[in-house]
Image (cartoon, coloured by chain):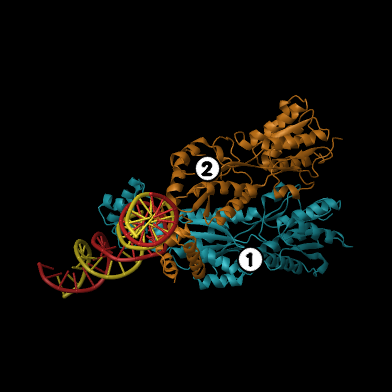
Chain colours: A cyan, B orange, C red, D yellow
Amino acid sequence: MRVRLEDVARAASVSPKTVSRVLNDEANVTDATRQRVRAAMEAMDYRPHPSARSLAGNRSFLVAMLYDNNDNPASTYLAEIQDGVLEACDAHRYSMMVRPLRMSGGDFIRRFDALISDHHPDGVVLTPPITDYAPLLKRLRERNVPYASVSPLRRGKIIGVTMDEQRASRAIVEHLLELGHRRIAHVIGIADHGASRWRLAGYREAMAAAGLPEDPALVVQGAFTFGSGVAAARQLFSLAERPTAVFAANDDMATGVMWAAGEYGLKVPHDLSVCGFDDTPLSRQLWPALTTVQQPSREMGKIAAEQLLGVLRGHGAGHLVQVPFSLQIRGSTAAVP
Amino acid sequence: MRVRLEDVARAASVSPKTVSRVLNDEANVTDATRQRVRAAMEAMDYRPHPSARSLAGNRSFLVAMLYDNNDNPASTYLAEIQDGVLEACDAHRYSMMVRPLRMSGGDFIRRFDALISDHHPDGVVLTPPITDYAPLLKRLRERNVPYASVSPLRRGKIIGVTMDEQRASRAIVEHLLELGHRRIAHVIGIADHGASRWRLAGYREAMAAAGLPEDPALVVQGAFTFGSGVAAARQLFSLAERPTAVFAANDDMATGVMWAAGEYGLKVPHDLSVCGFDDTPLSRQLWPALTTVQQPSREMGKIAAEQLLGVLRGHGAGHLVQVPFSLQIRGSTAAVP
DNA sequence: TAGCAAATTGACAGCGCTGTCATTCCTGTC
DNA sequence: GACAGGAATGACAGCGCTGTCAATTTGCTA
């Protein structure tokens, strides 16, 4: 039979309410009592019933991780974030659920409301690109649901985690510049995603700092997908004066660029240097391996969740934590011939 | 304020218990009453409180999806399964949680018990390779937790979903045979995984059917990872008489084989045909693209969850459903020179 | 050592549902 | 038209915990 809080109370010779206090780390329990209750819990392997706690306490101990399953980023990226979020939730004995939430279609607010009413999460972790969807943020605030964001575009009072993508982007372009490249192309991601903006800004910054005027023909639109990388590269390779290096805003597109290079008989890195962003497992498995920027995604998920849990547990306001990036210089970039 | 079951009851002029019956699709409610209650629920946008239902009814409406985060298969594979499971759960208004469960370390039964006691899932979906871990299955039965498996090794009374991997494997080797290959190597996955066994068996079957005696030097052990594919390939390429084709038990290893081929100056598919298994997104992004077997992973997750939910909802025993595979013939395989 | 405020502990109701069992309402039969 | 038997409905307690507030104990001060 299940061990209940009442059983623990009896074993520790205190009232159920006191056990509850210990369980929830509340104040006003003497150390001696706390010890005794803890020992009893331990001895009986007591497991509080989540539904009972939730019903009586009007909180669910549930964190929902939301992602956009319409134009979502690479699944490995999300999987890593999810892993980190889960780790943090586990550590604080919260449970986690993952929920896709298509931003397209007008009824997403209704779907979001349904999600909240159906599952009552105490808080929400937002992943790109839905970190920046204003109507959703507004609704979260209206419904008073705490949330933390992974790589939000807007800063302000947002809590969560970011990386300085612009600086990372600049760094990788500087790497190409150091190799002697001057005609460096950039393949942009989906236009309104924060990631796309920062990475483009970093590219421009590096180019400007090197005194190179922007050539509009070298900056082409992509959509974060492999196919869009192929298309962008074809466009670039058809240019009268071809780039000697391409920096794609993510690894999937960079892979597309390498693929297209094969089509055009261009050897990477001999005829063309290619670099990406994200350090997906894929990037290491290409031949040659892809020069890219490593984001600590798992860690970022964990940090975002920890910031949220801090708020949920009443440990103050929470912050927007910045994590470091690291350049992964691999075989796909080389000195200009 | 929240709409409660009692409010619906008042609006429909019935007792709370009757509303409960309608909510749970129970018998012994006249159609007229049922309609009236349903209308009231709709009108008031009633959302049952999951914790209250769970507490009173002694069921959680929760399905846990378990995976091994120690030597787990490709994360895209799991992500797709997860997606399918989630879809099925949503359709039946169950919630889903994902839980890593390392099989290594002796205390996994304890961790499993904790998982059950902490979250009270009504049922569990098992993904490879933990579909076949006997002590876990035993414990599931002891604790009377219904479960469904994705690609279980053992059949029997198991419910869930499978694919005829052996036949698929045989088919892809036959494809190589038709191209004129005779020295066909196989890179095995982690030894005790069902996937490894079936794929090896299919390879052997095809070779035997073609009248080719097995050359032990051509069958090398891998571990489902990219790196193990590289290592296996190096071993194969060092052979006095090299294979003209390599069938790796999954795409990651096949990618490793292609990578090693680059190292050895072997052009794929001209000097070497390579094929894999799984049809990961990666396989389409390689140059040349990888010939492989497509598994409908998302669909498989959905089917496994549906079988489980059928049991949970008292709709009979559930089955082990078999889904079809499809060969994806791409650029990495070609006729022997 | 009495007297008071603050800290600690406990009694009790109730969170929103469902299980059990009693009651009422039908339907068909003789 | 009375009655058995089954279908439909409802009354009520209770799932396991926490919020509220009252009771008790403790630690100080005078």
Residue wearing tag 1: A103
The number of numbered discs placed on residues in the rendered structure image is: 2
In the rendered structure, which amino acid carries the disc numbered 1? Met
Per the rendering, the mark at residue B159 is: none
Is residue B206 among what the camera can see?
A: yes
- Alpha carbon separation for disc pair 1 and 2: 38 Å
- Kindly identify which chain the residue marked by label 2 belongs to: B
In the rendered structure, which amino acid carries the disc numbered 2? Ala
Out of B17 and D29, give the one closest to the viewer: B17
Residue wearing tag 2: B317
**What residue occupies the far right of the structure in this picture?**
A240
Which quarter of the rendered picture does the N terminus of chain B lie within?
bottom left
Q: Name the spot of residue B194 as percent of width and height, x first.
A: 61, 36
Which quarter of the rendered picture does the C terminus of chain B lie within?
top right
- Kindly identify which chain the residue marked by label 1 belongs to: A
Q: Disc 1 on helix, strand or loop?
A: loop
The answer to which quarter of the image holds residue A108 is bottom right
Observer-side mark, 1 or 2, equals: 2
Neighbourhood count class around disc 1 (C-alpha, 10 Å): few under 14, some 14–19, many 20 upward: many
Q: Name the spot of residue A54 as percent of width and height, x first.
A: 41, 60
Out of B258 and B231, give the one closest to the viewer: B258
Task: Look at 75% across and 37% down and name the residue there.
Answer: B172
Above or below, comparing residue B144 to residue C8 in the picture: above
Q: Name the spot of residue A148 as percent of width and height, x first.
A: 54, 65
Out of B194 and A244, give the one closest to the viewer: B194
Q: Name the spot of residue B297 as percent of width and height, x first.
A: 65, 47
Is residue A298 among what the camera can see?
A: no
Task: Look at 63% across and 61% down and name the residue there.
Answer: A68
